[in-house]
Amino acid sequence: MKALEEKILKEGQVRPGNVLKVDGFLNHQMDIKFINEIGKEFKRLFADRQINKILTIEASGIGIACITAQYFDVPVVFAKKSQSINLDGSLYTTKVKSYTHNRTYDVIMAKKFLTRDDHVLVIDDFLANGCAVNGLIEIIKEAGATLEGVGIVIEKGFQPGGQKLREQGINLKSLAIVESMTEDSLTFRANE
Amino acid sequence: MKALEEKILKEGQVRPGNVLKVDGFLNHQMDIKFINEIGKEFKRLFADRQINKILTIEASGIGIACITAQYFDVPVVFAKKSQSINLDGSLYTTKVKSYTHNRTYDVIMAKKFLTRDDHVLVIDDFLANGCAVNGLIEIIKEAGATLEGVGIVIEKGFQPGGQKLREQGINLKSLAIVESMTEDSLTFRANE
């Protein structure tokens, strides 16, 4: 997505530890007009799929998933990090390692919101090692639901998550794939 | 908001510990069409205010804030719970007690996203004791920004958060105010 690559080049900042800060428009302050463009692009990329639910994980995936869901006319379900007393009954649970926060989260989702009848699009802001997406895919498998695709705003192509998903035959579409980045330069992989 | 009261009566479940579960449409699974109606109603209620930014707190406020922001044509900033290595530089920090999770969070926000020039609408899903909203108001004060209003989807009117905010003269609008709730019955305060 050309406009996204341009926005990353203009506003993104590379920090030590493979951190790409895009907190001015994507995951702290959110440029809602631009995120609507992202939602439209996800709809274009997954237009051939029958999707009835968008799945994401808190926190920074939620806003993107909600805006995107408007173009699919479907509800969003977000998996939650750590146990909450507001969630009882029957839960899907998995563990997700966050390299960003250097810890492992318990991730939970109420079973009633994902069943074998669901056709799911997974949406998230970043894909690096793929831990969050793999956690969501585990939940989808456990539910017996159908994974129709994974839509990622920014994939770090130099980390293994994306390749592993593609090797499994998963329908992964990343709007921008960062091929390499240093504090001075950032390059993108050409779109498929 | 009549449609919201009806939806709470139809789909909400009261659980021990003053928990009102509305996870089928508001804060786990999200009914995006309905949340658009919520966004429109917030716009109607705050139409007389010059708002240039919507502020919320992760996680369940984010989706509601993003959908609502479309009706105001403004960006969203969400405050984050606990330190992240993705957030560096100059931060606003405050502490927020969560009765739901029975713990206290450090809440942080990058200073660059809130300044004395900003006119802010705070949006959140629930108001009970008011801890999250008060944390956000502290940050707004520290920034020297102007609080134009607080928009809440569901206020628990039998807990003190709402009254305390109104006593401070804060322009609080709650789309539904639960006056009392037990497992068998739930009543709403009449709209102003």
Image (cartoon, coloured by chain):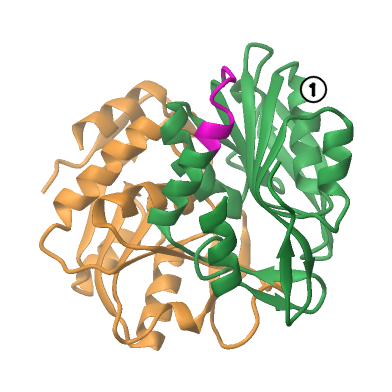
Chain colours: A green, B orange
The span shown in magenta is A42-50
Q: Residue B156: give x, y in percent of width and height.
A: 35, 48
Residue B146 occupies quadrant = bottom left
**Few, some or many C-alpha atoms within 10 Å of disc 1 (few <14, some 14-19, many ≥20)?**
some
Q: Residue A192: give x, y in percent of width and height.
A: 71, 41
Residue located 33% across and 27% down the image: B7
Q: Is residue A179 left or right of residue B184?
A: right
Q: Is residue A152 left or right of residue A100?
A: left
* Circle 1 residue: A142
Residue located 74% across and 70% down the image: A19
Q: Is residue A59 visible?
A: no
* Nearer the observer, B182 or B110: B110
Q: Is residue B60 left or right of residue B117?
A: right
* Nearer the observer, B157 or B148: B148
> Where A123 sits versus A53, above or below?
below
Q: Residue A91: give x, y in percent of width and height.
A: 71, 29
Residue located 81% across and 45% down the image: A162
Q: Is residue A57 magenta?
A: no
**Which chain letter goes with mark 1?**
A
Q: Is residue A49 magenta?
A: yes
> Where A128 sits versus B130, above or below?
above
Residue type, label 1: Glu
Total labels: the figure holds 1
